[in-house]
């Protein structure tokens, strides 16, 4: 599935949700950085039964090694939907791939 996702991006067959547009502006993530991160991405979480449609969370790195999480739809849609994107918080993620478990006191 990851290669199908990359292919959609390479062929400009993707769109941003309004939330993703807002977040990319706020977080200063360019379309070029999205493209770079998608080329080096891997699926780290899968949401096949998401209430808004099947989707997944990707981890990728830009050419300057900026880590990005990209939440996108499955590639079965005519246009891949970029739902949101952000830099993962190291306090919430281990190696940007696994969610940290909250400390229970």
Image (cartoon, rainbow, N blue to C red):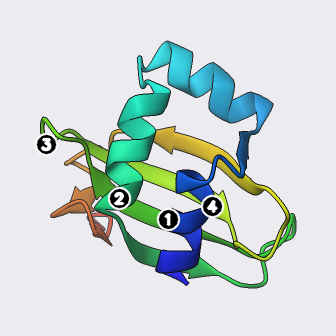
Which tag, 4 or 2, sits closer to the chain's start?
4
Q: Residue furthest front?
A: 11
Label 1 SS: helix
- In front here: 42 or 45? 42
Cα gap from disc 3 to disc 1, whole angstroms: 18 Å
Q: Is residue 88 above or below residue 55?
A: above
What residue is shown at x 78% (from left), y 83% (from top)?
Answer: 49
What residue is shown at x 20% (from left), y 48% (from top)?
Answer: 90
Cα gap from disc 1 to disc 2, whole angstroms: 6 Å
Q: In this figure, which residue is indicated by the disc labeled 1?
A: 6
Label 2 SS: helix
1 and 2 marks in contact (CB < 8 Å): yes
What residue is shown at x 84% (from left), y 70% (from top)?
Answer: 53
Q: In this figure, which residue is indicated by the disc labeled 3?
A: 65
Q: Which mark is residue 8?
A: 4
Label 3 SS: loop
Q: Is residue 45 above or below residue 94?
A: below
């Amino acid at each position: 599935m990851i290669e199908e996702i990359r292919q959609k991006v390479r062929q400009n067959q993707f769109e941003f949700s309004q939330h993703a547009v807002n977040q990319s502006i706020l977080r200063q993530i360019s379309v070029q950085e999205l493209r770079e991160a998608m080329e080096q991405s891997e699926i780290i979480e899968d949401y096949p039964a998401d209430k808004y449609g099947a989707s997944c969370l990707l981890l990728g790195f830009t050419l300057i090694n900026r880590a990005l999480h990209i939440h996108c739809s499955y590639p079965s849609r005519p246009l891949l939907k970029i739902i949101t994107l952000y830099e993962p918080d190291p306090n919430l993620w281990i190696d940007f791939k696994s969610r940290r478990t909250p400390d229970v006191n």
